[in-house]
Every structure is written in structure tokens, then in C-alpha cells.
Image: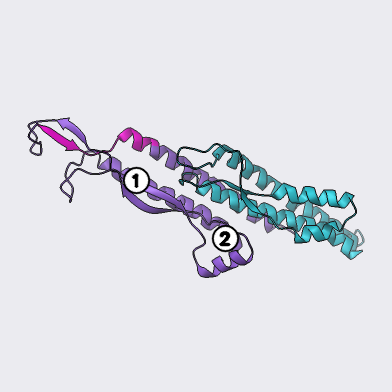
């Protein structure tokens, strides 16, 4: 229904930002993980956001019929691993050090993650603001004719 | 007579519809604030009412125009595109959102005022 679509859109924004924050948290907590299942250090994960077209067939048909070709929110379409090279740290005593004495470390930069986290937090807050705003508008609509 | 009374209400109807649609579009823009290649959108809200006023002064059938007018969703022009191909301007969207909800509230209050006048006329001024 059209009234609640507004809330669906903001909810999708909130959900996507939350998911992004989860991935950032995973990156930061694995910033020093030098061994994973694939026998290499942890690779930084990136949440790919993409816009969503109307999903369910009924509302899609309805939208096409009413000529309102609008999108319906955002989602994390995939989580990709960053292909940047691993950082090398000189530590010959380490059991995983290579012949030259270097240890491969994850390609996670904590500063970048913190910035990304800040961005996600602000986007999350903006979505909450929009949600409250829509709510107040619909409350006001209930007052028509009172 | 009754037709005349309800013509004004049609304007409110269109206004509230447009404002509600714009709210939806702004929420979509804000939800997509970090989506690569997403372009900010808006509707031709002001244009429709400007045309309506022009038609009204020309004594054309303005109310029919208003009933048939459709809000078009289009991409906003002249915005700075960020490095990921996204051009949502958060400050602009937030001010537009605040402005839009204020407009909505004003329209509802004004519509209620008008309906109360009508009510008062029906009851002969006895509340």
C-alpha cells in the first residue's frame, strides 16, 4: 500500500546501513587476523549498496499502471572482498614469516573503517529522521476533517 | 454552489497528494545516499500549481487541468556528482524534507479551517 511504502523505503535504508555497520565491525575485529580458512590473511569486506525496484509483482504492476516509476529503497546487494595487496610486516621470529622474514597482514585500514562507520552512522540517523517525519505527516493526515 | 465549494478542496487534494509523493521520493533519496550511480530525484510539484494559476487568470478550465495533471518523477539537474557517481545532496534533501512536511501540515490545517467554515455555515453558526 502506498502509505506504508514510505516506511518500507526508510526501513530498507536503516537495514542496509545496519548491515554495512556489521561488515565494518567484522573488518575492524579482524584487523589482525593473519590466518583464515583460505590460508591467507583476512581480506577487507565491502558492502555494495544498490537501489531496489519494486519487488512483489502486484505492486510492480500497480506502479507501472500508475506511471509512477519510482524505486523502493536500498539494499546491500553483495559483500565483496577487497583485492588490495596485503600489508607486510617484518617479524622474522613469527611462525608464519616467509623466507625474507615478512608476515602478511590483513589489508584492513582501521582509519578507513572508522570513516566508513561514521558515514554509515550519519546515514542511519538521516533515515530515522525521515521515518519520524513521515510518521508525523501521516498523523497529521488523520486530522483531516476533525 | 456545492461544486464551487468543493473546487477548493480539489486543490488541497492535489497538494496533499503531491506533498505525500515528494515525501516518499525524498525518503528514497536519503535511503540511497551512499548507493553508487544513484541520481537524486524530485517531482514537478510547483510547476503544476503555477500552471494552474496561469490557466485560472486566462479563464480556461483550470480545475480540469488540475484533476488531470500528473506529477512526474525526474532526476534533479545541476547537482555535484560524487566520486562514486552518486549525486544525493544530504543538506538539500533534509531542508526539502522539513519544508515539505511543514507545507503538508499547513495544508491540512488550512483544509480543516475551510471544512469548519463549511460546517459552521451548515449549522447556521450554531457550532
Residue A2 locus on image (x, y percent): 60, 62
Which label is found at residue A46?
1
- Residue, disc 2: A4
In the structure shown, which secondary structural element does the residue marked by tag 1 occupy? strand
Mark 2 Cα-neighbour bin, 10 Å: few <14, some 14–19, many ≥20? few
Whether residue B12 is situated above or below residue B102 in the rendered picture: below
> Along the horizontal axis of the image, is B104 left or right of A4?
right
Mark 1 Cα-neighbour bin, 10 Å: few <14, some 14–19, many ≥20? some
Whether residue A55 is situated above or below residue B106 in the rendered picture: below
In the structure shown, which secondary structural element does the residue marked by tag 2 occupy? helix
Chain letter of the residue carrying label 1: A
What's the magenta region? A101-115
Residue A61 locus on image (x, y percent): 57, 68
Q: Is residue A131 visible?
A: no
Chain letter of the residue carrying label 2: A
> Along the horizontal axis of the image, is B9 left or right of B28?
right
Residue A76 locus on image (x, y percent): 40, 52
The colour chain B appears in is cyan
Residue B119 locus on image (x, y percent): 85, 61
Q: Quarter of the image containing the N terminus of chain A?
A: bottom right
- Identify by letter the chain in purple: A
Q: Quadrant of residue B69?
A: bottom right
Amino acid at each position: 500500500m502506498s502509505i506504508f511504502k514510505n516506511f518500507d523505503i526508510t526501513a530498507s535504508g536503516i537495514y542496509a546501513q545496519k548491515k554495512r555497520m556489521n561488515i565494518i565491525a567484522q573488518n575492524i575485529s579482524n584487523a589482525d587476523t593473519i590466518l583464515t580458512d583460505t590460508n591467507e590473511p583476512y581480506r577487507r569486506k565491502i558492502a555494495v549498496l544498490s537501489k531496489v525496484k519494486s519487488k512483489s509483482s502486484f505492486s510492480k504492476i500497480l506502479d507501472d499502471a500508475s506511471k509512477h516509476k519510482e524505486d523502493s529503497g536500498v539494499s546491500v546487494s553483495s559483500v565483496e572482498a577487497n583485492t588490495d595487496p596485503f600489508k607486510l610486516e617484518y617479524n622474522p621470529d613469527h611462525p608464519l614469516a616467509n623466507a625474507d622474514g615478512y608476515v602478511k597482514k590483513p589489508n584492513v585500514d582501521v582509519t578507513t573503517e572508522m570513516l566508513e562507520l561514521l558515514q554509515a552512522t550519519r546515514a542511519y540517523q538521516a533515515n530515522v529522521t525521515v521515518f519520524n517525519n513521515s510518521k508525523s505527516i501521516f498523523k497529521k493526515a488523520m486530522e483531516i476533517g476533525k | 454552489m456545492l461544486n464551487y465549494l468543493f473546487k477548493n478542496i480539489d486543490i488541497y487534494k492535489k497538494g496533499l497528494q503531491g506533498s505525500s509523493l515528494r515525501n516518499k521520493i525524498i525518503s528514497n533519496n536519503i535511503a540511497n545516499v551512499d548507493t553508487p550511480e544513484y541520481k537524486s530525484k524530485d517531482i514537478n510539484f510547483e510547476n503544476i500549481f503555477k500552471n494552474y494559476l496561469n490557466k485560472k487568470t486566462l479563464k480556461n478550465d483550470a480545475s480540469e487541468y488540475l484533476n488531470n495533471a500528473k506529477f512526474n518523477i525526474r532526476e534533479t539537474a545541476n547537482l555535484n556528482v560524487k566520486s562514486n557517481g552518486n549525486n544525493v545532496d544530504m543538506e538539500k534533501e533534509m531542508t526539502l524534507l522539513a519544508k515539505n512536511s511543514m507545507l503538508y501540515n499547513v495544508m491540512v490545517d488550512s483544509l480543516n479551517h475551510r471544512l469548519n467554515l463549511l460546517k459552521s455555515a451548515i449549522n447556521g453558526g450554531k457550532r
